[in-house]
Image: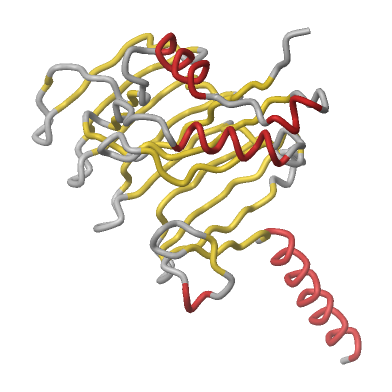
Amino acid sequence: MKNRKRVILLICLGFSVVSSWAQKDTVFYNKKIEIVALRKDASSYSVSYPDSIKKNRITTKTFSISGQIWSETPFLILNKSEKVYDGIQRTWNRKNGNLKSEITYKNNKLNGSLKTYWSNEQLRRDDVFKDGKLLTGKCYTKAGADTTYYEYDVKPSYPGGQEMLYKYLRENLEYPEQAKENGIEGTVMVRFYIEKDGSITDVTAYKSSGNHLLDAEAVRVVRGMQNWIPGKIEGKFARKTHTLPVNFFLNN
């Protein structure tokens, strides 16, 4: 009897260890996709599962607060602050739970099959990529007929292109006097969202220069930008995140 109890205890302990290992970093989000501390304030949540073989790989799954899966994304962890897509990312239709997309990445680049589906589970697109470049692509109607091809993911762009973006930064960036007097230089990585109408929101210093004056000026100048040309997913305007380096260098 004692042995049996010991076996049951070991099984329970083993299950407890596996459960705590398999589910880590549960994060709750409100409707604005802002992190909240309590489940009662959340509308969705994510759970990160470490890989049992590749120690630097995790798979993050997102769910509605009721437990319906929304997405599954594999990542490679490069360092404490950086991770990249690596593997097959899947998303599901939030209304009916049907599979919505399957996208294959390798080291943050599209590499392999990219399939998307209509809400009725009919194949919508069938693309093949290699090292981020499109090799073949087909699009289909909801009824399954061939249709005109269009890009899956169109990045947002600044009106006039990169040259006009750099021109705006040169003309509007003001080097903080205190930083200039002390010979402080650096690069601020500014992250922001480009909304469906092209407006700029949620501007933050994603990677700091190490100096609050440079960080604040970088955020200010980005907030002052005109509307961008918004990005698209599956031919429809979509909210997208963008990261922009803002450089502060003194002429010697």
* Residue 96 sits in quarter: bottom left
Q: 204 or 73: nearer the eye?
A: 204
Q: Nearer the viewer, residue 179 or 234?
A: 179
- For image coordinates 56% across by 33% down, the residue present is 85
**Can you give x and y, in whole percent of width and height, for residue 3 in the image?**
90, 84
The structure residue drawn at horizontal position 34% and vertical position 26%, both measured from the top left corner, is 153
Tag count: 0
Q: Residue at x 71, y 40 (%)?
A: 81
Q: Position of residue 90 (x, y in %)?
A: 43, 42
134 to 218, vertically: above or below: above
Percent position of residue 130, x then y: 48, 12
Residue 165 percent coordinates (x, y): 43, 17
Question: Which residue is farthest right?
Answer: 2
Asked where in the image residue 66 lies, by quadrant, the reply is: bottom left
- 225 to the left or right of 2: left
What is the image's colouring? Answer: secondary structure
Image height of 112 relative to 89, above or below = above
> Which quadrant is the C terminus positioned in?
top right
Q: Quadrant of residue 188?
A: top right
The quadrant the N terminus occupies is bottom right
Looking at the image, which is closer to me, 101 or 230?
230
Q: Is residue 122 above or below residue 250?
A: below
